[in-house]
Image (cartoon, rainbow, N blue to C red):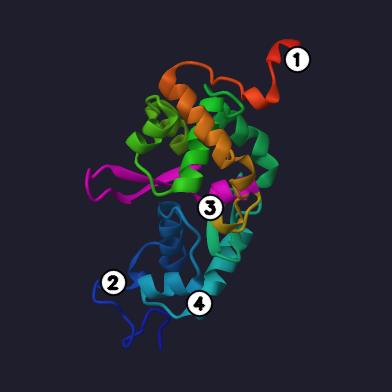
Amino acid sequence: MSQSSAPDTRPEYVDFDVQDFPGGLAACLEAILVATDRPLTAEDFSRVLAVDPGPVNVALESLAESYSDRGFELRRTARGWQLTSRAAYQPVVAAFVKDGQTARLSQAALEALAIVAYRQPMTRAQVGQIRGVNSDGVIRALLVRGLVREEGLDEQTHAALLVTTDLFLERMGLQSLEDLPSLAPFLPDEDSALAQARQELSGQPESPDPAQGSPQGEEE
């Protein structure tokens, strides 16, 4: 049986044989690796190309070895195979990524990122409403850096919904969003929240509690 024959599992949309292309199976794998934005397993390639997983693994291993002297590598991780920049060239890639940008995220970008992380999925408008200012610029920066991405549309407004990415989890050292620290320790207690609300509504500082005496004698 040829490595490209899989009559029982061939998807209807696969109307080709990998050997009909220049470079055969290896070149077909490269074409997919360049096009994808996520790791792929040998089974993923096998299904798309209608090729047995065995030859796919052999071809992937051979490709990885052939890239040994290049600025990129074909890396195999727990999630699958993916083309990535070689670690030795990290300063070069960092210079490109930071070109025209600040090395660190701005305070505004950090605020927007935190809102998306804890409240996702969210639209740009919803992030702006929470921050009280238009946040399109900082969200655009987060998209460019790959920390957030668009996924689906809001049912009511049809605006793009924002979610965090795997890169965000990696940069934060988290396995999943469930590992995000709780916000409870940073939230005000009920009495403080009510006092602040009353003060904002009245526009005047809240009167001191008579039982606690006059504040005139207190230190500044």
Give the Cα separation between the discs numbered 2 and 4. 17 Å
Q: Nearer the viewer, residue 12 or 3?
A: 12
Residue 194 to residue 10: above or below: above
Point out the stretch of residues depicted in magenta. Answer: 145-172
The tag earlier along the polypeptide, 3 or 2, is: 2
Which callout, 4 or 1, points to the residue nearer the camera? Answer: 1
Q: Which mark is residue 55?
A: 4
Q: Is residue 167 magenta?
A: yes
Give coordinates of residue 208: x percent, y percent.
Answer: 61, 21
Q: Residue 166: which numbered mark, if any? A: 3
Residue 35's tag is: none
Q: Residue 162 appears at what percent x and percent y?
A: 39, 45
**Relative side of 183 to 133, left or right:** right
The numbered disc on residue 218 is 1
Number of other residues with Cα within 10 Å of mark 4, as a class: few under 14, some 14 to 19, many 20 or more: some
Asked whether disc 2 touches disc 1, contact meaning CB atoms under 8 Å apart, the reply is no
Closer mark to the observer between disc 3 and disc 2? 3
* Residue in front for this viewpoint, 3 or 139: 139
Q: CA distance from mark 3 to mark 1?
A: 51 Å
Placement of the C terminus among the 4 image quadrants: top right
